[in-house]
Amino acid sequence: AKKESGSSYSFFTQHMEMLSISKLEMENHLRQSLDRKELEIVYQPQVDCMKGAITGVEALLRWNHTTKGYISPSDFIPVAEEIGLIDAIGEWVLRGACRQMNAWHRQTDEPLMISVNISVKQLHDERFVDKVITILEETGLEARYLEMEITENVAMQDKQMGVLNRLRQLGISISVDDFGTHYSSLSYLKRFPVTKIKLDQSFVRGVQTDDKDRAMIKAIISVANAFQLQMIAEGVETEEQADFLVANGCHHIQGYYFYKPMKPAQLQAILNKELHD
Ligand code: C2E
Ligand code: CA
Ligand code: CA
Ligand code: CA
């Protein structure tokens, strides 16, 4: 608990100074970002190396501030969580991503999955499941094509577990994001109604240099197999990393090695090309 409060303190002092924007300013600007249409969703393909095809995409939020320029989601999502704006922003992302994916589905016979990051804070909202149902109805996307990426978190209580169970019952998939970076990983899997583990990029980074990272990746892959969970690796930047993962049984890969996050039109062009190859 000490570490949590400590890191949020240094977050505001260091990052805000770097951005030359005060916390209050950031809060005010963030509140207006939705109205001002400064938020944008980019999409990063997830590749199945066995099929040699894109099978899903992750929606990632971007904030293009009018005067401060690009602000990273790693910087503004924690602020949005703290000032209670994450529900509105999260809903906006979910609706936009589902709408976009449904539009793509109407153009193809091989529908992709859409992965959307969900903050644990959003699971505290008792209307969350109803909002999700409404969004699926509004956008026309089938629940089985929606996956929610949730970072394992100590703040997850039985109540939030109940929310996840209801989402699973709707047919939505649940992926544990940044798997392996938090201490409670294993006991979590027993209680957590998950369908997929997302191997954190910090392990992937050490594939060529660090025996322990390689051992960790192998261990996590065997955990995924033991629990009969799907698995994907994120932050894959090199051929060596991809080869190691595939050789050890993780063939779903996301990272700059294949694709960076991109605007919808750019992904559309890639999907059209894949279709005609
Ligand atoms: P994340 O969910 O772990 O997303 C992975 C991050 O790694 C993304 O950063 C992505 O752009 C980046 N990435 C992808 N491939 C590579 C690679 O090969 N190498 C490297 N070095 N990085 C790669 P991004 O887009 O800056 O997002 C940062 C974090 O912000 C995300 O981490 C996620 O926790 C959060 N976030 C982004 N969008 C949303 C959102 O809509 N809602 C919520 N709650 N959080 C979001
Ligand atoms: Ca994610
Ligand atoms: Ca992640
Ligand atoms: Ca991360």
Image (cartoon, rainbow, N blue to C red):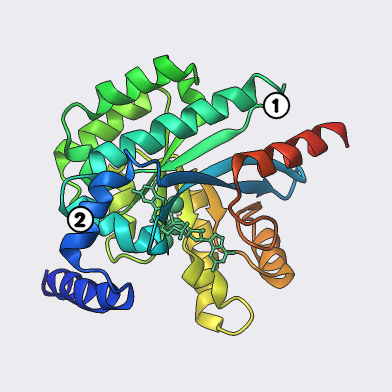
In the image, which is nearer the foreground, mark 2 or mark 1? 2
Q: Distance between the residues labelled 2 and 1?
A: 41 Å
Q: Which of marks 2 and 1 is nearer the N terminus?
A: 2
With respect to residue 19, does 34 lie above or below? above
**Residue 268's image quarter?**
top right
Q: Which residue is drawn at 57% across and 42% down?
A: 57
Q: Name the residue under label 1.
A: 110
The image quadrant where one finds ligand 4 is: bottom left
Q: Mark 2 points at which residue?
A: 27
Q: Which of 103 and 160 is in front in this view?
A: 103
Q: In this view, does 133 lie to the left or right of 248?
A: left
Q: Kindly tell me whether residue 179 is visible in this rendering.
A: no
Q: Residue at x 15, y 37 (%)?
A: 159
Q: Which residue is drawn at 32% across and 46% down?
A: 33
Q: Is mark 1 on a helix, strand or loop?
A: loop
With respect to residue 152, does 91 lie above or below? above
| Residue type (three-letter) at the residue carrying disc 2 | Glu
For the C terminus, the quadrant is: top right
| Residue type (three-letter) at the residue carrying disc 1 | Glu
Q: Residue 142 carries which label?
A: none
**Label tally:** 2
Q: Which of 194 and 55 is in front in this view?
A: 55
Q: Position of residue 105 (x, y in %)?
A: 63, 23
